Amino acid sequence: MQAIDNQPRLRWWSHAWRYALMLAVSGLAWFEVAKWQWENHRWWFWTDLGLGLAGLVIVAWRRRFPLAVATVLNATSFVSWTSAGPATLALVSLATRRRWREILPVGLLALVAGFVLESYNPINSDTLAFTVPFILAIVAVTVGWGMYIGSRRELLATLHERARSAEAEQAARVTQARTAERGRIAREMHDVLAHRISLVTMHAGALTYREDLTAEEMRATAGVIQEASHQALVELRDVLGLLRDDTGDASPERPQPSAADLPALLAEAAGTGMRIQTDELVELDGIPDTIGRTLYRIVQESLTNARKHAPNTLITVLVTGSPSAGLLVQVTNPLEVGTVGADAPESGLGLIGLAERAALVGGRMTHRITPGREFLVEAWLPWPA
């Protein structure tokens, strides 16, 4: 298997000790032979020294051209003892790549070069029984050390990559959680404020366009606007408290509405002048809080939409179902051609938020216009037994 090439960047001291080690290896290999060359074949002395110096220069390109540099330097070891240091470093560097198709031929070349060089060593008095195992051991240690370094580099690179991946995944999870929290706060803010602001819009429109209101009716309408505005500010303060690090007295964790609060919601809407018909409501006390909260928000948003877009129509609220079978919610109102007052903005975010709420608890929600020209909001929510 081909290993990953993970060559770290070397600083000046890393280069310094490597060159010092090369000089030491070359000096030990050439020390005794150099004297003989100087006394008997001075041309060989200068040739050996020149090849060694050239090897110190060529070895600097061992990372860019590892196979070529290792091959050339080990080939010069056939005639040069001073090339021992650069050839050894080049073979170690090549072995760190852990590619056997490169290591085997160059390692074999180093073995042959060592045997040939020692065969005509003028001062060698060792027998083949010592020389052959010694050269084999040197090449094996060189290759093994290089492969160990390469394996360690690959392990460190893998750990660093895993750490970077873990950090990226953690950042993605944080971003996803932040986005989900923002979406939850946006849904909560929309559901809470749209209900109150629609009351203010409807009654303010009545004050603007109705000229036959008595002083008592005007005061009553203004009172509804005042109360709805006050409740909108209170609920906005509660929702914004979720965004603070220190909630202080914002009380963001106030009790959330449940299915048991649905009759009060319908009574409040009817008290503001809406016409609401509840054909059938199941027993609401046994509905779990999570499902009940979603039920409450669906009905609340449906009433808000009807108040904005069809304020003078009859709204029908139907809640049926049973444990295990699930909870079916249907809110319908006839379409109206014109509305009183200024047109309300049509964002569609409320219905999107309702669909998200229903999906979060394992249910589903749809809205459509029926053949009878009625706007229908229908949702099914799970109701565990």
Image (spheres, helix red, strand yellow):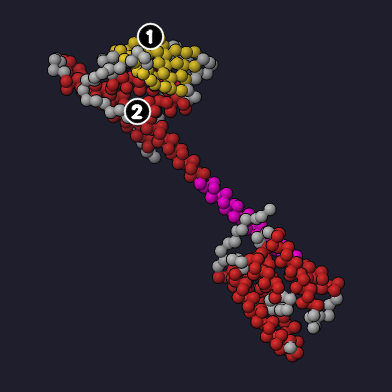
- Which residue is at 36% across, 14% downward? 371
Residue bearing the label numbered 1: 279
Identified at 30% across, 12% down, the residue is 314
Instruction: Determine if residue 60 is in view.
Output: yes
Image location (x, y in percent) of residue 196: 29, 24
Left or right of 250 in this view: 285: right
Q: Nearer the viewer, residue 108 or 8?
A: 108
- Above-or-below relation of 101 to 363: below
Percent across and percent down for residue 54 are 63, 78
Q: Do the residues bearing badges 2 and 1 touch, measured as CB atoms within 8 Å?
A: no
Read off the magenta span: 139-168
User: How would you rate the neighbour count of disc 2 (Cα within 10 Å): few for under 14, some for 14-19, many for 20 or more?
Assistant: few
Query: Which residue was labeled with disc 2?
Result: 348
* Quarter of the view holding residue 225: top left
- Residue lying at the far top in this picture: please name it: 279
Identify which residue is drawn at 37% across, 16% down.
370
Q: Position of residue 317 (x, y in %)?
A: 37, 14
**116 or 217: nearer the viewer:** 116
N-term-proximal mark, 2 vs 1: 1
Q: Is residue 253 above or below residue 373?
A: below
* Cα–Cα span, label 2 and label 1: 27 Å
- The percent coordinates of residue 291 (x first, y second) are 46, 21
What residue is at 63 percent from the left and 66 percent from the top? 66
Front residue of 73/252: it is 73
Residue density around tag 1, few if under 14, some if 14–19, many if 20 or more, within 10 Å = few
99 sits left or right of 182 in the view? right
Kindly tell me whether residue 263 is visible in this rendering.
no
